[in-house]
Image: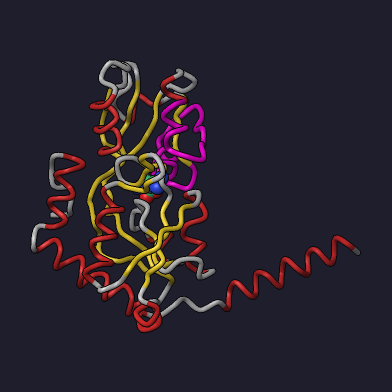
Amino acid sequence: MKMLKTLAAAALALCAAATVQARPLAEIEKSGTIVLGSEGQYAPFNFFKGKELTGYEIEVAEAVAKKMGLKYEWKTVGFDALLTGLAQDRWDLVIASHAITDERSKAVTFTLPHYCSGGQIVSMKPEIAKAGDLKGKVVAVQTGTTYLDAVKKVPGIKDVKNFPTDEAARNALGSKRVDAWVTDKFVAKEMLAKVPKAGFKTGDMLFVEQVAAAVAKGNQGLADAWNQALKALIADGTIGKISQKYFQEDVTCK
Ligand code: ARG
Protein backbone atom coordinates (compact mmCIF):
# COMPACT_ATOMS: atom_id res chain seq x y z
CA MET A 1 0.00 0.00 0.00
CA LYS A 2 2.75 2.36 1.01
CA MET A 3 4.52 1.47 -2.22
CA LEU A 4 1.33 2.21 -4.20
CA LYS A 5 1.01 5.59 -2.53
CA THR A 6 4.60 6.44 -3.31
CA LEU A 7 4.03 5.41 -6.91
CA ALA A 8 0.89 7.53 -7.13
CA ALA A 9 2.75 10.52 -5.71
CA ALA A 10 5.54 10.06 -8.21
CA ALA A 11 3.05 9.86 -11.09
CA LEU A 12 1.38 13.04 -9.90
CA ALA A 13 4.67 14.84 -9.63
CA LEU A 14 5.43 13.77 -13.18
CA CYS A 15 2.09 15.11 -14.45
CA ALA A 16 2.63 18.38 -12.62
CA ALA A 17 6.08 18.68 -14.14
CA ALA A 18 4.69 18.01 -17.60
CA THR A 19 2.12 20.77 -17.35
CA VAL A 20 4.48 23.42 -15.97
CA GLN A 21 4.71 26.22 -18.51
CA ALA A 22 8.06 27.74 -19.41
CA ARG A 23 8.14 31.50 -18.85
CA PRO A 24 7.62 33.31 -22.17
CA LEU A 25 9.84 36.28 -23.03
CA ALA A 26 7.22 38.84 -21.91
CA GLU A 27 7.05 37.31 -18.45
CA ILE A 28 10.83 37.22 -18.11
CA GLU A 29 11.01 40.85 -19.22
CA LYS A 30 8.34 41.80 -16.73
CA SER A 31 10.29 40.20 -13.89
CA GLY A 32 13.48 41.82 -15.19
CA THR A 33 15.63 38.74 -14.51
CA ILE A 34 16.41 35.69 -16.62
CA VAL A 35 17.22 32.49 -14.72
CA LEU A 36 20.18 30.71 -16.29
CA GLY A 37 21.26 27.11 -15.67
CA SER A 38 24.77 25.69 -16.06
CA GLU A 39 27.07 23.06 -14.60
CA GLY A 40 30.18 24.86 -13.35
CA GLN A 41 32.58 21.93 -13.75
CA TYR A 42 33.66 22.26 -17.35
CA ALA A 43 36.60 24.64 -17.63
CA PRO A 44 37.16 26.85 -19.51
CA PHE A 45 33.52 26.98 -20.64
CA ASN A 46 31.77 27.02 -17.27
CA PHE A 47 33.58 26.63 -13.95
CA PHE A 48 34.02 28.02 -10.46
CA LYS A 49 36.90 30.32 -9.64
CA GLY A 50 36.54 30.21 -5.88
CA LYS A 51 32.89 31.01 -5.37
CA GLU A 52 32.45 32.80 -8.67
CA LEU A 53 30.90 31.02 -11.64
CA THR A 54 32.84 32.03 -14.73
CA GLY A 55 34.11 30.85 -18.12
CA TYR A 56 33.64 31.52 -21.80
CA GLU A 57 29.96 30.66 -22.02
CA ILE A 58 29.15 32.21 -18.64
CA GLU A 59 30.52 35.53 -19.87
CA VAL A 60 28.76 35.09 -23.22
CA ALA A 61 25.44 34.47 -21.44
CA GLU A 62 25.88 37.46 -19.15
CA ALA A 63 26.66 39.71 -22.13
CA VAL A 64 23.61 38.40 -24.03
CA ALA A 65 21.31 38.88 -21.01
CA LYS A 66 22.57 42.45 -20.62
CA LYS A 67 22.00 43.10 -24.32
CA MET A 68 18.43 41.84 -23.86
CA GLY A 69 18.03 44.38 -21.07
CA LEU A 70 17.81 41.71 -18.39
CA LYS A 71 19.49 40.94 -15.10
CA TYR A 72 20.49 37.30 -14.60
CA GLU A 73 20.51 34.73 -11.87
CA TRP A 74 22.59 31.53 -12.09
CA LYS A 75 21.62 28.06 -10.93
CA THR A 76 24.20 25.28 -11.13
CA VAL A 77 23.43 21.56 -11.04
CA GLY A 78 24.85 18.32 -12.42
CA PHE A 79 25.07 18.12 -16.20
CA ASP A 80 22.40 15.42 -16.56
CA ALA A 81 19.72 17.49 -14.76
CA LEU A 82 20.10 20.62 -16.88
CA LEU A 83 17.92 19.96 -19.92
CA THR A 84 15.14 18.24 -17.94
CA GLY A 85 15.10 21.28 -15.62
CA LEU A 86 13.87 23.37 -18.56
CA ALA A 87 10.67 21.33 -18.81
CA GLN A 88 10.18 21.72 -15.05
CA ASP A 89 10.64 25.50 -15.35
CA ARG A 90 13.55 25.51 -12.91
CA TRP A 91 15.42 27.93 -15.21
CA ASP A 92 14.64 29.80 -18.43
CA LEU A 93 17.74 28.86 -20.39
CA VAL A 94 20.57 26.35 -20.13
CA ILE A 95 24.09 27.11 -21.30
CA ALA A 96 26.47 24.26 -20.50
CA SER A 97 28.20 23.25 -23.73
CA HIS A 98 25.36 21.16 -25.10
CA ALA A 99 25.87 20.29 -28.75
CA ILE A 100 22.86 20.58 -31.02
CA THR A 101 21.74 16.99 -31.66
CA ASP A 102 18.57 15.49 -33.16
CA GLU A 103 17.92 13.57 -29.96
CA ARG A 104 18.11 16.65 -27.72
CA SER A 105 16.14 18.72 -30.24
CA LYS A 106 13.16 16.45 -29.58
CA ALA A 107 13.10 17.68 -25.97
CA VAL A 108 14.35 21.30 -26.09
CA THR A 109 14.66 24.25 -28.47
CA PHE A 110 18.23 25.26 -29.25
CA THR A 111 19.42 28.82 -29.86
CA LEU A 112 22.11 29.73 -32.39
CA PRO A 113 25.52 28.24 -31.49
CA HIS A 114 28.04 30.21 -29.43
CA TYR A 115 30.94 27.97 -30.43
CA CYS A 116 31.95 25.21 -32.82
CA SER A 117 34.15 22.39 -31.61
CA GLY A 118 34.26 18.61 -31.39
CA GLY A 119 35.27 15.52 -29.46
CA GLN A 120 38.97 14.74 -29.28
CA ILE A 121 40.94 11.72 -28.09
CA VAL A 122 43.30 12.36 -25.17
CA SER A 123 45.69 9.71 -23.85
CA MET A 124 49.04 9.34 -22.13
CA LYS A 125 50.46 7.01 -24.75
CA PRO A 126 51.57 8.21 -28.18
CA GLU A 127 50.27 5.00 -29.75
CA ILE A 128 46.67 5.91 -28.85
CA ALA A 129 45.81 8.79 -31.17
CA LYS A 130 43.25 7.64 -33.73
CA ALA A 131 39.78 6.10 -33.49
CA GLY A 132 41.22 2.77 -34.63
CA ASP A 133 43.73 2.84 -31.76
CA LEU A 134 40.85 2.66 -29.27
CA LYS A 135 40.26 -0.97 -30.24
CA GLY A 136 40.63 -3.16 -27.14
CA LYS A 137 41.02 -0.09 -24.93
CA VAL A 138 39.12 1.39 -22.00
CA VAL A 139 37.85 4.92 -22.58
CA ALA A 140 36.54 7.48 -20.07
CA VAL A 141 33.79 9.99 -20.88
CA GLN A 142 31.28 12.12 -19.03
CA THR A 143 27.78 10.62 -18.75
CA GLY A 144 25.11 12.09 -21.02
CA THR A 145 27.54 13.67 -23.47
CA THR A 146 28.02 13.43 -27.21
CA TYR A 147 31.45 11.91 -26.38
CA LEU A 148 29.72 8.91 -24.85
CA ASP A 149 27.55 8.47 -27.96
CA ALA A 150 30.55 8.78 -30.25
CA VAL A 151 32.78 6.40 -28.30
CA LYS A 152 30.05 3.75 -28.14
CA LYS A 153 30.08 3.70 -31.95
CA VAL A 154 33.83 3.05 -32.26
CA PRO A 155 34.17 -0.63 -33.20
CA GLY A 156 36.10 -2.93 -30.89
CA ILE A 157 36.26 -0.73 -27.79
CA LYS A 158 36.87 -2.88 -24.73
CA ASP A 159 34.94 -0.75 -22.25
CA VAL A 160 33.48 2.74 -21.89
CA LYS A 161 33.61 4.13 -18.37
CA ASN A 162 31.08 6.83 -17.48
CA PHE A 163 31.76 9.61 -15.01
CA PRO A 164 29.38 12.23 -13.59
CA THR A 165 31.74 15.06 -14.55
CA ASP A 166 34.26 15.55 -17.33
CA GLU A 167 36.90 16.30 -14.68
CA ALA A 168 36.36 12.89 -13.11
CA ALA A 169 36.81 11.29 -16.54
CA ARG A 170 40.06 13.25 -16.97
CA ASN A 171 41.27 12.16 -13.52
CA ALA A 172 40.65 8.54 -14.45
CA LEU A 173 43.08 9.00 -17.33
CA GLY A 174 45.54 10.95 -15.16
CA SER A 175 45.70 8.07 -12.69
CA LYS A 176 45.89 5.55 -15.56
CA ARG A 177 42.67 3.76 -14.65
CA VAL A 178 41.69 4.10 -18.33
CA ASP A 179 43.62 4.20 -21.63
CA ALA A 180 41.98 7.29 -23.11
CA TRP A 181 39.56 10.13 -22.45
CA VAL A 182 37.33 11.78 -25.03
CA THR A 183 36.47 15.41 -24.39
CA ASP A 184 36.04 18.77 -26.09
CA LYS A 185 39.04 19.91 -28.11
CA PHE A 186 39.19 23.27 -26.30
CA VAL A 187 38.90 21.62 -22.89
CA ALA A 188 41.85 19.44 -23.93
CA LYS A 189 43.81 22.40 -25.28
CA GLU A 190 43.40 24.39 -22.07
CA MET A 191 44.27 21.40 -19.90
CA LEU A 192 47.45 20.66 -21.85
CA ALA A 193 48.49 24.30 -21.54
CA LYS A 194 47.81 24.27 -17.80
CA VAL A 195 49.64 21.05 -16.95
CA PRO A 196 52.11 20.58 -19.82
CA LYS A 197 54.19 18.08 -17.82
CA ALA A 198 51.32 15.81 -16.80
CA GLY A 199 51.89 13.59 -19.85
CA PHE A 200 48.54 14.09 -21.58
CA LYS A 201 48.61 13.88 -25.37
CA THR A 202 45.90 14.94 -27.78
CA GLY A 203 45.01 12.69 -30.68
CA ASP A 204 42.47 12.91 -33.50
CA MET A 205 39.09 14.55 -33.41
CA LEU A 206 36.31 11.95 -33.45
CA PHE A 207 33.60 14.34 -34.68
CA VAL A 208 32.70 18.02 -34.87
CA GLU A 209 29.69 19.73 -33.32
CA GLN A 210 27.91 23.06 -32.85
CA VAL A 211 27.32 24.09 -29.27
CA ALA A 212 24.34 26.22 -28.25
CA ALA A 213 22.14 27.30 -25.38
CA ALA A 214 18.73 25.66 -24.96
CA VAL A 215 15.29 26.83 -23.85
CA ALA A 216 12.14 24.84 -23.09
CA LYS A 217 10.72 23.14 -26.19
CA GLY A 218 8.78 25.70 -28.23
CA ASN A 219 9.76 28.76 -26.15
CA GLN A 220 10.60 30.40 -29.49
CA GLY A 221 10.12 34.01 -28.41
CA LEU A 222 12.90 33.65 -25.86
CA ALA A 223 15.16 31.82 -28.31
CA ASP A 224 14.59 34.54 -30.96
CA ALA A 225 15.43 37.37 -28.56
CA TRP A 226 18.55 35.51 -27.41
CA ASN A 227 19.61 34.89 -31.02
CA GLN A 228 19.17 38.51 -31.97
CA ALA A 229 21.29 39.71 -29.04
CA LEU A 230 23.94 37.02 -29.64
CA LYS A 231 24.20 37.94 -33.33
CA ALA A 232 24.68 41.62 -32.47
CA LEU A 233 27.41 40.75 -29.95
CA ILE A 234 29.20 38.52 -32.47
CA ALA A 235 28.99 41.33 -35.06
CA ASP A 236 30.34 44.03 -32.73
CA GLY A 237 33.28 41.90 -31.56
CA THR A 238 32.15 41.38 -27.94
CA ILE A 239 32.00 37.58 -28.22
CA GLY A 240 35.30 37.49 -30.13
CA LYS A 241 36.97 39.33 -27.25
CA ILE A 242 35.62 36.91 -24.65
CA SER A 243 36.81 34.05 -26.86
CA GLN A 244 40.34 35.49 -27.13
CA LYS A 245 40.47 35.84 -23.35
CA TYR A 246 39.81 32.15 -22.77
CA PHE A 247 41.21 30.46 -25.88
CA GLN A 248 43.55 32.94 -27.61
CA GLU A 249 41.49 32.24 -30.72
CA ASP A 250 37.98 32.75 -32.06
CA VAL A 251 35.81 29.72 -31.26
CA THR A 252 32.57 31.02 -32.81
CA CYS A 253 31.19 29.07 -35.79
CA LYS A 254 32.44 30.31 -39.14
N1 ARG B 1 29.72 19.03 -25.91
C1 ARG B 1 29.41 17.81 -25.23
C2 ARG B 1 27.94 17.49 -25.39
O1 ARG B 1 27.25 18.14 -26.08
C3 ARG B 1 29.80 17.83 -23.78
C4 ARG B 1 29.16 18.86 -22.93
C5 ARG B 1 29.60 18.75 -21.49
N2 ARG B 1 29.15 19.88 -20.77
C6 ARG B 1 29.38 20.08 -19.46
N3 ARG B 1 28.89 21.15 -18.91
N4 ARG B 1 30.03 19.19 -18.79
O2 ARG B 1 27.44 16.58 -24.81
Asked if 7 appears above or below 189 in the picture, the reply is: below
Side of 232 where 142 appears, left or right: right
> Is residue 238 in the magenta section?
no
Residue 108 or 57: which is nearer the viewer? 57
Residue 115: image location, x then y, percent: 23, 52
Give the colouring mode of the picture: secondary structure
Indicate left or right for 232 with 33 as reference. Answer: left
Position of residue 114 measured from the top left corner of the image (x, y, whole percent) = 24, 57
Q: Residue at x 29, y 41 (%)?
A: 44
What is the span of residues highlighted in magenta in the rendered image? 143-171
Name of the residue lying farthest toward the left:
236
In the image, farthest residue toward the right? 1
Residue 155 location (% of width, % of height): 42, 34
**Residue 180 sits in quarter:** top left
Residue 164 x %, y %: 51, 40
Q: Residue at x 44, y 26 (%)?
A: 171
Q: Residue at x 16, y 56 (%)?
A: 239
Q: Quadrant of residue 67?
A: bottom left
Q: Please say whether residue 148 is one of the residues in the magenta stretch.
A: yes
What residue is rendered at 16% in x and 67% in y? 231
Quadrant assignment for the N terminus: bottom right
Judging depth in this view, the residue of 219 and 74 nearest the camera is: 74
Task: Name the image quarter holding the C terminus.
Answer: bottom left
Q: Across the whole image, how many numbered discs are drawn on residues?
A: 0
Q: Is residue 171 above or below residue 120?
A: above
